[in-house]
Amino acid sequence: MKKKPIFLLILLTGVVGVLIFRNLFFTKTSNGELTLYGNVDIRKVDLGFRVGGRILGIDVEEGDRVKKGQKLAQLDEIPFQDELSLALARRSQAIAVLAKMEAGSRPQEIAQAEALVREREATVTNLQTDFNRIEKLIATGAVSQQAYDNAEASLKESKARLVTAKQSLNLAREGYRSEDVAAARADLQAAEAQLASARTRLADTAINAQEEGTILTRVEEPGAVVAAGQTVLTLSLDNPIWIRAYVDEPDLGRIYPGMNAAIYTDSFPDQTYHGHVGFISPEAEFTPKSVQTEELRTRLVYQLRIIADDPDHALRQGMPVTVRLFEKDQQLPSK
């Protein structure tokens, strides 16, 4: 006999749980409207430097409002300025080498090579005359074989020196090879790339706000040495702000992207925010884990994202809100 009241109590508790859950998480319908209950979601960004180094200063505190492009933190720039100076010097050197190769030999160098050719031509002429004379005398025995051999060797050496001088003159007139010029041009391009990288690294010593928002956390302090990508600040963005809500399958067909919405908060129940349905999940999921009754844990729902079109700073992360959805031909409540 005692089991029946206990069973009735459990049954009553389950029914009450279902009703409470539907009131808290799912839809109510009235005059063709849908009413949802959800929570505010705000996008957050963890900010850090793209290079590592020592923090020189942080210009904001937790709770500060920041504008797009505002400087938030700065690393010590000295190592990166030195890196930039070295890259500038290497580029200047590469420019000078390329200019030298493209210009070729100077007129003075060509004139010097021509003079050397004339000098060695004269030497060859004199030695040729001496050799011819000795060649005639050796048949009579007037000169020794050693003298003849020495004259012949000197003549051959001078002719070889003349060939070398002429080749040097041709090189001076033609300038550097095209392959050498191409290599010098590639060295200049590499130097330009290193310079661009050094400038980028120097610019990356500052953290600038990419969007308007509010500083949530200040993780590091000036003087700390941080690695590249390490979180220094966390920024809560002003936009976008959306409402995360869930809809049961029977009401899913009544909702579509772009559907108008009116958003209300418990803090300011008389203030209306306007919005629209921005996302409808393509797949079902189980109800949130906060609902622990056995019946509701197995219910499949679809997540919605309602974008607030005119948010202000009163909409805060996690805040519970009420959302009323309207058809296109229905009039939205005024603010």
Image: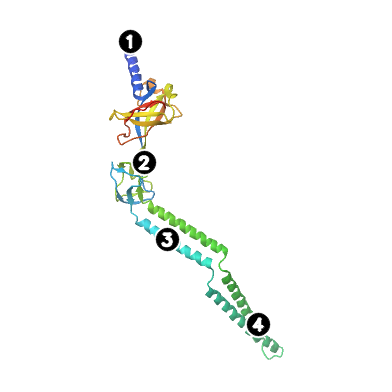
- The amino acid sitting under disc 4 is Glu
Circle 2: is it few (<14), some (14-19), or many (20+) Cα within 10 Å?
some
Q: Element type at marker 1? A: helix
Mark in the foreground, 4 or 2: 2
- The amino acid sitting under disc 3 is Leu
Asked whether, in this view, residue 159 is left or right of residue 271, the answer is right
Q: Which residue is mark 4?
A: 152
Asked if the residue under mark 4 is in contact with the one under mark 3, i.e. CB atoms within 8 Å, the reply is: no
- Distance, label 1 to label 2, CA atoms, is 56 Å
- Distance, label 1 to label 3, CA atoms, is 90 Å
Q: Earlier in the sequence, mark 2 or mark 3?
A: 2
- Distance, label 4 to label 2, CA atoms, is 89 Å
Q: Which mark is residue 322?
A: none
Q: Element type at marker 4? A: helix
Q: Position of residue 162 (x, y in %)?
A: 61, 77
Asked if the residue under mark 2 is in contact with the one under mark 1, i.e. CB atoms within 8 Å, the reply is: no
Mark in the foreground, 1 or 2: 2
Front residue of 103 and 19: 103
- Distance, label 1 to label 4, CA atoms, is 136 Å
Of the 4 image quadrants, the one containing the N terminus is top left
Circle 1: is it few (<14), some (14-19), or many (20+) Cα within 10 Å?
few
- Distance, label 2 to label 3, CA atoms, is 35 Å
Q: Which mark is residue 88?
A: 3
